Amino acid sequence: MKEAAQLLNGMQSSGVVHAYAVFGAVAQMRYTEPVITLDLDILVALPDPDRLDLLPGIYEFCANHGFQTAGHAGRVGAWPVQFLPVYDALTREALEHAEICTLEEVPIRVVGANYLAAIALATGRSRDHERVLALLESGAASRAQIEALARRHGLSEAWGRFQKRLGDG
Amino acid sequence: MDERIRELIRRQTEWQESRKNLTWEEKLHMVAQVREEVARLLPAYRRRAPNPQPAQEHEK
């Protein structure tokens, strides 16, 4: 994971991406017990988001640093890495508000708990609802904060569905 | 509830709680190891597992 953090920081400092942040299950595990995941998911802001072909700069950077890419993922050490450009106001805001943590003494940007929960809410599959619940139960995310994010990003119905299905209140 | 079951659940809960107390690095290391182990076992599992039949075959 140290290699991944170094690679991502390199991408940002060399301008291949404007910003990056880890999200998904790997980010969730900062707060909850371990969950099995295949991939390290990375949210990125690209310098030229209007390009038709979004990720070749990233893959080229990976290859130039000795990492394989195959299909829609690169492989860095033990982790297949998937990059996803920010795709709406919520993911853009989550990236802007990413927290800086350290992994094996290397800084790495990670999406915070409330944004992770809101993104999961927007995705809306059963396992995403489980993520929201796990983040709430860990105490890292708060109902009030998620609700506020949901309201601002048109997710009030999704939040209502979650509350009805899994929420306590 | 049987006292042995109660004790088992207590120990399992304790184990689950202890995993929450791992550092982020430790959790990621654990998950990477599990994933690598599954990948390592997959070829042997595939050799042993019977070929799955299409669902409609079972329904006949």
Image: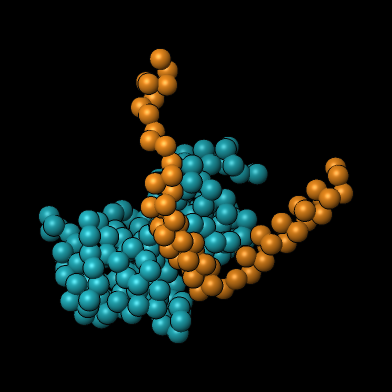
Chain colours: A cyan, B orange
- Picture coordinates of residue A112 (x, y %)? 47, 65
Task: Please state the horizontal and vertical placement of residue B5, each as a whole percent of the image.
Answer: 80, 48
- Counting from the top left corner in percent of width and height, residue A101 is at 46, 77
Residue sticking out furthest to the bottom: A105
- Rendered view: B52 above or below A87: above
Residue sitting at 71 percent across and 56 percent down? B12
Q: How many marks?
A: 0
Vertical placement of residue A11 versus A32, above or below:
below
Q: What residue lies at 82% left-to-right and 54% top-to-bottom?
A: B7
Quadrant position of the C terminus of chain B in the picture: top left
Q: Residue at x 15, y 64 (%)?
A: A56
Whether residue A119 is visible here, answered yes or no, is no
Give coordinates of residue B1: x percent, y percent: 85, 42
Residue at the front extreme of this rendering: B48
Asked which quadrant contains residue A125, the reply is: top left
Is residue B19 visible in the rendered structure shown here?
Answer: yes
Instruction: Classify A27 as above or below A150.
Output: below
The residue located at (42%, 21%) in the rendering is B58
Compared with B55, B31 (above or below) is below
Q: Looking at the image, which is closer to me, B60 or A135?
A: B60
* Residue farthest left in this picture: A52
Q: Is residue B16 left or right of residue B27?
A: right
